[in-house]
Amino acid sequence: MKKQRKKRADDLLKLLGQAHDQIVQSVRSGNLAEAGEILEDCQNAAISIGTAIDEEEGEGTDTVRLLEEYCELVYQLHEAVFQEKAISAEDVRAALDKRFKNIGNAYDRDVPLQKEVVFLPYKASMWDSLESVWETYRKDARWNAVVVPIPYFDKNPDGTLKEFHYEGDQFPEYVPIVSYHNYNLQEIHPDRIYIHNPYDDCNIVTTVHPDYYASRIKEYTDKLIYIPYFVLTEYDPNNPASVASMAHFAQVPGVVHADEVIVQSENMKKCYVEALVRLTGEKTRTYWEGKIKGTGSPKLQKAARIREQAYDYPEDWLRKIMKKDGRKKRVIFYNTSLTAFLRDGDAMIDKIQDVVNVFRGYSEETVLLWRPHPLLEATIRAMRPALWGRYRSFVEDFLEEEIGIFDDSADLYRAISISDAYYGDQSSVVQLFTTAGIPAMIQNVDIREQRQAKW
């Protein structure tokens, strides 16, 4: 039985035991009317418990059978006190206690506690960082696994909240979604909560709704677990420069407030620990080593199985990818990252234009599948607003001229599965292609017109 409903059933059973004491006292004092009223309450409580067990555990349990016998006993006692028949308080206690003890023993057997685990993704395109963990819990009858997509906001350059976003309708159809309006974390207090956004109010481009900051929701669960939505190129924990560069990923609220942090490798765990020890002192090393687990990223696990999965590709994609003779063109996955735009946005737009022009010349054999980072538009508007018009104009031209495929959907793996090679910026997506066994090439923003490239 689910945690919240079992708690209600537990509470009702406890009240039944207390009510029996009150019934005995009323009978002993001769207040039979009061005893009758309490007996009616006991019968209603027993019916409520039985209904909950039937709905959660299925019909035919010993507990419900015993509750039905209990209701019959309560009815007989009620009739006796209502008709003011001679009845001793000791006989009432003995009859109720015997039934109640049998119910308690059966209840413990028939109604195990089903713990609650809730996943709080904010962007559908980042669900892959939690999906395999959710699947494991979903298959375990001891757990009720709930997915509650949470809202987020873009930010203005001054840090104030801008557009409101909710992507609950963009998750895969096989993932049952619960609206955040209908899931009260504080009231339900799930046993575990999983998050994939660690920044709270520290991200200058977007923020999850403040109600879901790690600093707050840690109070609403027994265990808060953070899994990064990204994977990184492996860092060297013995290199001071590498450790220093980890601060952006390790020294964030989600890591600090979580009870457990799961990262992509043991090597990455060492990097996190070193970065955090730099922040909090050597005396905290044992604490961080216990909290951070290098057991692997669900993203990499999914990428390793990508060729085993079937995907439904949009008709528009297939029209551009398939030749007239039925053969498939080579598909080059083109990735543009946030870092490159923030470093030099004008140069980056020039590079994108150059890449597109190069692939125009190979259109009979090759299709460019351009997939910008999911937060690229929000980042440009928040941090490089002067570039927004130029970037958006180019995207519109790309779409209107049908130069290639522009993929801003939530499903990254669909695009990877159809691709023959990766080209673009250094990013976590490179790790996914490498894991999937698909070749990758990193672009140099400063190089133009490489028309002799071979794929």
Image: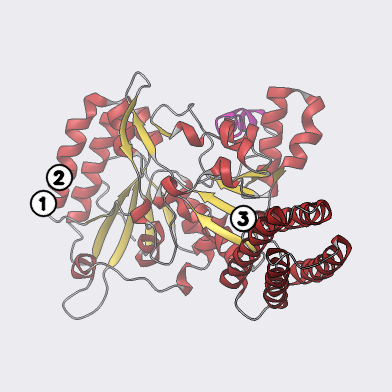
To which residue does mark 2 refer? 396
Residue type highlighted by circle 2: Glu
Q: Is residue 287 left or right of residue 34?
A: right
Q: Which residues are magenta?
A: 240-251
Residue type highlighted by circle 3: Glu
> How far apart are the two marked residues, 3 and 1, measured between alpha carbons?
48 Å
What is the secondary structure assignment of the residue under circle 2? Answer: helix
- Residue at 53% x, 51% y: name it: 119
- Residue at 56% x, 64% y: name it: 135
**Disc 1, disc 2: CB below 8 Å?**
yes
Q: Quadrant of the N terminus?
A: bottom right
Residue type highlighted by circle 1: Glu
Residue 384 visible within the image? yes
In this rendering, the answer to whether 86 lies above or below 289 is below
Q: Residues within 10 Å of mark 3 (few under 14, many from 20)?
A: many
**Disc 3, disc 2: CB below 8 Å?**
no
To which residue does mark 3 refer? 116
